[in-house]
Image: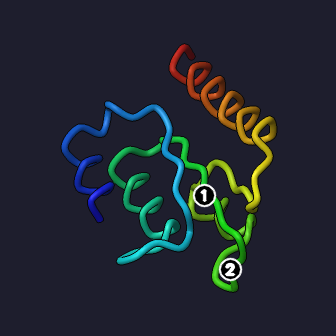
Amino acid sequence: RSALSRFKENPEAFDLVVTDQTMPGMTGAELAQSLIEIRPGLPVILCTGYSDHIDEDRARSLGISGYVNKPIETDEFMGLVEILLQEKRELMNV
């Protein structure tokens, strides 16, 4: 909830958001939906160890840009971040 509150203060200050699915107070998917509602097109990566409630297809249907299973390989994760930021830059230059 504090991340959402901080985001609401200045949504344009964030280029990309990484969240975990399991958090106190709200799920990562719920946070992502709220962020994307405020700022459509925001790249969001959802990380999860295991969840009966969400998988990659469901995450994409919610507008989540990236879905990563834990444990996360650093190179794979950084590659995903790079791809999502590049896509964002390309969209902004269109």
Q: Choose top left, top right, bottom left or bottom right for residue 55.
A: bottom right
Look at the image and name its color scheme: rainbow
Q: Secondary structure at mark 2?
A: loop
Amino acid under label 2?
Ser
Q: Quadrant of the N terminus?
A: bottom left
User: Disc 2 marks which residue?
Assistant: 51
Residue 89 position (above or below residue 14): above
Residue 1 in the figure: left or right of residue 30: left
Could you classify mark 1 by the number of other residues whose Cα lies within 10 Å: few (under 14), some (14-19), or many (20 or more)? many
Residue 58 in the figure: left or right of residue 14: right
Sooner in the amino-acid sequence: mark 1 or mark 2: 1
Residue displayed at 46% across by 72% down: 23
Pointer 1 with pointer 2, Cβ within 8 A: no
Observer-nearest of 26 and 49: 49
Q: Provide residue 76's location: percent of width, then percent of height.
A: 80, 40
Q: Provide residue 57's location: percent of width, then percent of height.
A: 74, 66
Tag of residue 46: 1
Residue displayed at 64% across by 83% down: 53
Residue displayed at 32% across by 55% down: 3
Amino acid under label 1?
Leu
| Residue farthest to the left, as pictured | 9
The CA distance from mark 1 to mark 2 is 12 Å
Observer-nearest of 37 and 76: 76
Residue displayed at 29% across by 47% down: 7
Tag of residue 59: none
Observer-nearest of 24 and 85: 24
Q: Choose top left, top right, bottom left or bottom right for residue 30.
A: bottom left
